[in-house]
Amino acid sequence: MQEHTKSSTLENAIALQKYGVGQPVRRKEDDTLVRGKGRYTDDFNLPGQAYAVVVRSTHAHGIIRGIGLDAAKAMPGVLGVWTGTDLDAAGYGPFTCGLPLKSRDGSPLLQTNRQPLATDKVRFVGDPVAFVVADTLAQARDAAEAVELDIEPLPAVTDPEEAAKPGAPQLYDHIPNNVALDYHYGDMEQVNAAFASAAHVTKIDIENTRVAVVSMEPRVGLASYDKKAERYTLQVPTQGVAGNRANLAKNLKVPNEKVRILTANVGGSFGMKNINYPEYMCILYAAKALGRPVKWLDERSTSFLSDSHGRAQKIHAELALDAEGHFLAAKLEGYGNLGAYITGVAPGPLSLNTGKNFSSVYRTPLMGIDIKTVLTNTTLMGAYRGAGRPEANYYMERLIDHRAADEMGINRLTMRKRNFIKPTQMPFPASSGVTYDSGDFQAVFNKALEISDHENFAKRKKESKKAGKLRGIAVGSYLEVTAPPSPELGKIVFDPDGSVQLITGTLDYGQGHATPFAQVLCEQLGVPFESVKLVQGDSDIVHTGNGTGGSRSITASGMAIVGAAKLVIEKGKRAAAHMLEASEADIEFEGGSFTIAGTDRSIDIMELAKRLHDSKVPEGVPDSLDVDHTSEPVPSAFPNGCHVAEVEIDPDTGVVQIVRYSAVNDFGTVINPLLVAGQLHGGVVQGIGQALMEHVRYDESGQPITGSLMDYALPRAEDVPFMTVGDHPVPATTNPLGSKGCGEAGCAGSLSTVVNAVLDALSDHGIKHIDMPLTPERVWRAIQDAKGKAA
């Protein structure tokens, strides 16, 4: 045993150098996914399964006068056609929003209580009103086209500001002026006093455009029902099985144990797949009614209608400053577009999250937020990568660049430096109501200027001018308040075959959890990296957890893993004391081995786990090293950074090209720099997409005019520059790993930086503002208008 242990100790030390925290380990799942061996929900099928197709409204607003089903029921292969009346009779509960948000008068958020299928009115194009199930998908599609809808059209409204005006079309009788939440934060008496005493006040009206998620994998569900056990099973792409099981059970009005959710590989989500949808209720109903599995697969055209969208705010922002450019107060007021129904966390990003992130890295003594979240005849709103964080940072950075700095004649970089929160001020109670625990914003800023070669920009601008191009640069800081505190599961199981199951309630939908989580466990317990198997996708095993969202995975699951590892060590000491015939008080653990203090007698953790499996132990000695641990709620963290974008514009066409991009970030302790860089790149690209090309639009009647990839532009490889990335980590003090999260930061940094860089280039023509997206047409028209005014 002794020689074996010495060898194992050396191997563990070498493994930690290769697989420990901070190492750029390649993702465990890459071989599977790159080779096309991944298994997504549509890859799963059950014997005897039928197929569902949903019938949707083609009107944005209207009264349902009748639904003709006879022709559809008579079609070949049709097993059933159902409407909202049928589902209402089943007693299902409505979709609601669980956020405890209140309006300025103290009244709670007004719920829309959406039913799976509309029965009285339709409220957006794509609103589901019936569904068909048939033996084949083709038969279900044919029958769905035969369903006859008699809908009396009503006037529609798609703009939240217009929807909140008296006389606008009303979506719900119990929600006056369509305002579900009149959100307010801050002491406006103090805020207004600060503005009144300010040497300068800068203002801007700005729109944060609606965007579609367009995940690579559309939504899909495979439902079955066990009549004997009275139990539903749903295979579905999600962001976390435990939380979604609880929501689904609530809608079905059954105990949690009567629902099982299975999630395999997930092809992207960005917030959209983390809520329950009507289609899932429909196929679960049909599976029970028919006694056979039912599958539903969305198509890209209908996903533009039925998947939740993101962003969609109209904001008036103001910043008050003293004569030297120090911030005195800031305020936002405006409207957030909820779409036709409130589900999931939709009002949060539009109101609460925007307010919590608005002050960013700057000392802003006072802040006031007044945002009405308004119902309109459009697709429902949801969380989208960042969920209020990129929006808030965008407003602050736009106020500084080309507004406050230029209006006061203060260099933009200087103004930022004067207002950064200093490391010596940590922990810092921000005016948003949260307390930052750590950060060195000035150092991050300085490093970003350095790696971007900011000092030589003037030379590059002259070269662009010679080539007939406009060149602009922008430096933008950001800070995010990650998801609010919540407990998380950290369950560890040592299997007889030598593998170690790590079970946690977050869920990987592209982040690469299997690798950094294994790195953390490897560092904590010294178990072989290759032995760790991550389990996240079965609600029968993952009994607790809030899923992945809000950049919380590494902080929440990381804390749970660390806590579980401590419990494993405690059990291991008791077991090792028995195996080594020593006192438990004399057992030490280090580098994956339990050792009798002061001796060379040891046993490796994997060997100990194997012996416990293979032998009987006396009472009082653990019979395994397995633990089932739920962590305490993990506080929010504050990832932050500074991005620098450089663009060239062809004034003859309005085409914008991002020619340089640099970013320095503080993500606290970085578990795997390779994965962190990938997450940053992805977020930056999504920010570029919204800044330059993405925009969901509706006509005056509520008809979507960006309903396919022919109409809705997404960034491609040619639109994205190579990025220079740097790190300046300041470990968080609020979780044992010191991590801060990184999944959404790219959006928070890129959105404002890209827009401000374009406007910097256009400042040669005196242009100060264009709303996103900065398409070639918008840029070209702005240049032509500016030339016309100059003439």
Image (tube, rainbow, N blue to C red):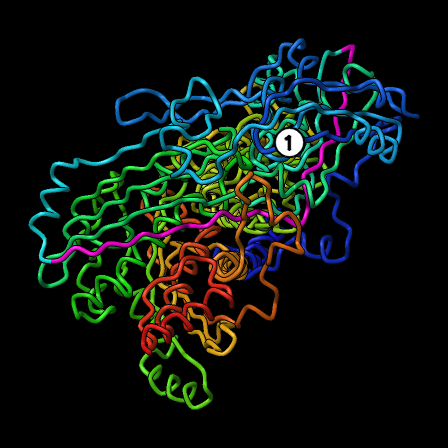
Looking at the rendered structure, the kind of residue marked 1 is: Leu
Instruction: State the predominant SS element of the stretch in magenta.
Output: strand
Decide which of 571, 789 is in the foreground and name it: 789
Q: Which residue is mark 1?
A: 612
Q: Quadrant of the C terminus?
A: bottom left
State the residue in front, 715 or 85. Answer: 85
Spot occupied by residue 658 in the image (x, y as percentages of width and height): 48, 72
Residue sitting at x 9%, y 53%: 198
Quadrant of the rendered image containing residue 26: bottom right
Q: Please tell me which residue lies in front, 639 or 722.
A: 722
Please provide percent x and percent y for residue 427: 22, 46
**Left or right: residue 330 compared with residue 161:** left
Tell me where residue 295 sits by quadrant.
Answer: top right
Residue at image x 28%, y 64%?
A: 401
Residue at the location (38% across, 45% down)? 314
166 in relation to 26, above or below: above
| Residue 582 appears in the picture as rendered | no
Q: Residue furthest right?
A: 76
Mark 1 nearby-residue class (10 Å; few <14, some 14–19, many ≥20): many
Magenta range is 200-228
Q: Is residue 293 left or right of residue 367?
A: right
- Of 434 and 465, the residue lying toward us: 465
The residue under the point 67% across, 27% down is 280
